[in-house]
Image (cartoon, rainbow, N blue to C red):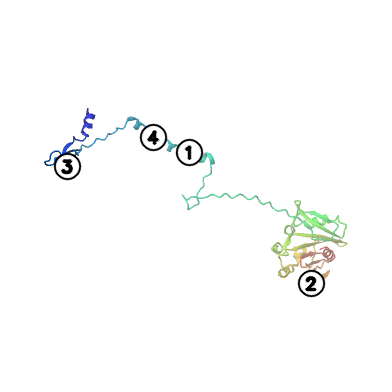
C-alpha cells in the first residue's frame, strides 16, 4: 500500500484547459457565420511548483559484509606477522651465525664495516748458505764443527782438525749444529773484539772464507770478508785503524799465544797489495789489508796471504 501511494504522489497533476486565441481560430469563426472569433481551446500540462521529494532507497548492511571485514582484518594481522618472522629469521638461516661486530671505542652505536684481512703465511727464516770467495781450486775444503766449542777451546779444535791436513794451503769452513756459521757467529764464539761488531754487520756480507797455511813452524790461519755492494771503502779506512789500538786483541787470531807485540803497526806489501803488519817478540806476525778494494783479509802468515790473494 505504501508503495502505491508513493508512486501516485509522484505523477503530474491533471491538465487544465487554457483558451488561446490564434489567427486560425479567428478565421474559422468568421467562416462559420461571422461573429467574433472564438477562442481555441488547447490543453497544456500543469507544472507542480512544489513537487514532493522522492525517497531514496537505503540499503542496510547485512551481517555477511561485517563478517568479510573481520576476515580481512584477521588476514592482514597474520600477513604482517609472517613478514616480520621471515625478515627476522630468514637472514640468519641463509647466512648462518655471524660473529657480532663490536664498534670501536668512542663510536658506540655507529655502523661499522669489518674487513677481514687474509693472514699472510708465516715467513720462514732463510737458511744461510756458505759460498767460497776463492775462484781458483784449493784442493778441497775442510769442514770444522764448532757445536761443542767455546772461546777457550776454538783454537784447540782448529789445531786438532787441521792436523790431518798434509797440503801447505787448505780452505776451511766452520759449522754449528750442522749449519754454516756466519762471520758474526764465528767471531762471537771466538771472542774477537779487535773491531766493533757493527763495523762488520753494517758494511760486510754475512759469509766469510777461511784458510790455513802449514809449514815447519806450525799452522797459520787466515780469514777473508767481503764488502757489501753499497759500502764505501773510503769511509771504512779510518774506522779500520781502530784495530791497531789494542795489539793484544789481535793475538787471539793466532792458534798459538804470541807475546811481546811491537809498539805499532808498519806498512808492507804482499803481491803488490798494501798491508799493515804487527810483529811479536815470539816470532809471529799479524797482517791485515785490502785486496782489490773489495775484500778485507786478516792473516798470520805472509805466504798464506799471498796464496789466498792468488785465488780471489
CA gap, disc 1 to disc 3? Answer: 97 Å
Check residue 266 in the rendering and tell me which mark sits there, or answer none.
2
Check residue 86 in the rendering and tell me which mark sits there, or answer none.
1
* Disc 1 + disc 3, Cβ < 8 Å: no
- Furthest residue in direction left, as rendered: 35
Q: Nearer the viewer, residue 162 or 11?
A: 11
- How many neighbours does mark 2 have within 10 angstroms: few (below 14), some (14-19), or many (20 or more)? few
CA gap, disc 4 to disc 2? Answer: 114 Å
Q: Secondary structure at mark 4?
A: helix
Does 149 appear above or below 13?
A: below
CA gap, disc 1 to disc 2? Answer: 94 Å
CA gap, disc 2 to disc 3? Answer: 175 Å
Check residue 27 in the rendering and tell me which mark sits there, or answer none.
3
* Disc 1 + disc 4, Cβ < 8 Å: no
CA gap, disc 1 to disc 4? Answer: 21 Å
Residue that mark 4 sits on: 72
The mark closer to the camera, 4 or 3, is 3
Amino acid at each position: 500500500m505504501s508503495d502505491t501511494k508513493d508512486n501516485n504522489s509522484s505523477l503530474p497533476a491533471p491538465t487544465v484547459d487554457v483558451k488561446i486565441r490564434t489567427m486560425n481560430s479567428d478565421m474559422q469563426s468568421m467562416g462559420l457565420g461571422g461573429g467574433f472569433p472564438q477562442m481555441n481551446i488547447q490543453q497544456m500540462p500543469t507544472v507542480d511548483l512544489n513537487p514532493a521529494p522522492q525517497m531514496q532507497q537505503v540499503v542496510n548492511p547485512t551481517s555477511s559484509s561485517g563478517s568479510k571485514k573481520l576476515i580481512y582484518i584477521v588476514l592482514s594481522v597474520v600477513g604482517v606477522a609472517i613478514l616480520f618472522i621471515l625478515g627476522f629469521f630468514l637472514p640468519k638461516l641463509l647466512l648462518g651465525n655471524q660473529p657480532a661486530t663490536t664498534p670501536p671505542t668512542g663510536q658506540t652505536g655507529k655502523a661499522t664495516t669489518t674487513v677481514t684481512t687474509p693472514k699472510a703465511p708465516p715467513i720462514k727464516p732463510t737458511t744461510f748458505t756458505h759460498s767460497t770467495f776463492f775462484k781458483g781450486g784449493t784442493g778441497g775444503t775442510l769442514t770444522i764443527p764448532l757445536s761443542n766449542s767455546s772461546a777457550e777451546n776454538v783454537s784447540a779444535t782448529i789445531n786438532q782438525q787441521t792436523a790431518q791436513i798434509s797440503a801447505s794451503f787448505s780452505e776451511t769452513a766452520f759449522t754449528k749444529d750442522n749449519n754454516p756459521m756466519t762471520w758474526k757467529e764465528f767471531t762471537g764464539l771466538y771472542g774477537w773484539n779487535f773491531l766493533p761488531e757493527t763495523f762488520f754487520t753494517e758494511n760486510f756480507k754475512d759469509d766469510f772464507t777461511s784458510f790455513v797455511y802449514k809449514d815447519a813452524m806450525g799452522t797459520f790461519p787466515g780469514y777473508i770478508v767481503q764488502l757489501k755492494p753499497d759500502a764505501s771503502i773510503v769511509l771504512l779506512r779510518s774506522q779500520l785503524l781502530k784495530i791497531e789500538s789494542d795489539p793484544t786483541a789481535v793475538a787471539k787470531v793466532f792458534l798459538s799465544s804470541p807475546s811481546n807485540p811491537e809498539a805499532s803497526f808498519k806498512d808492507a806489501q804482499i803481491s803488490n797489495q798494501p798491508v799493515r803488519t804487527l810483529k811479536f817478540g815470539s816470532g809471529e806476525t799479524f797482517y791485515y789489508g785490502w785486496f782489490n778494494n773489495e775484500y778485507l783479509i786478516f792473516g798470520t802468515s805472509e805466504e798464506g796471504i799471498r796464496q789466498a790473494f792468488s785465488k780471489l
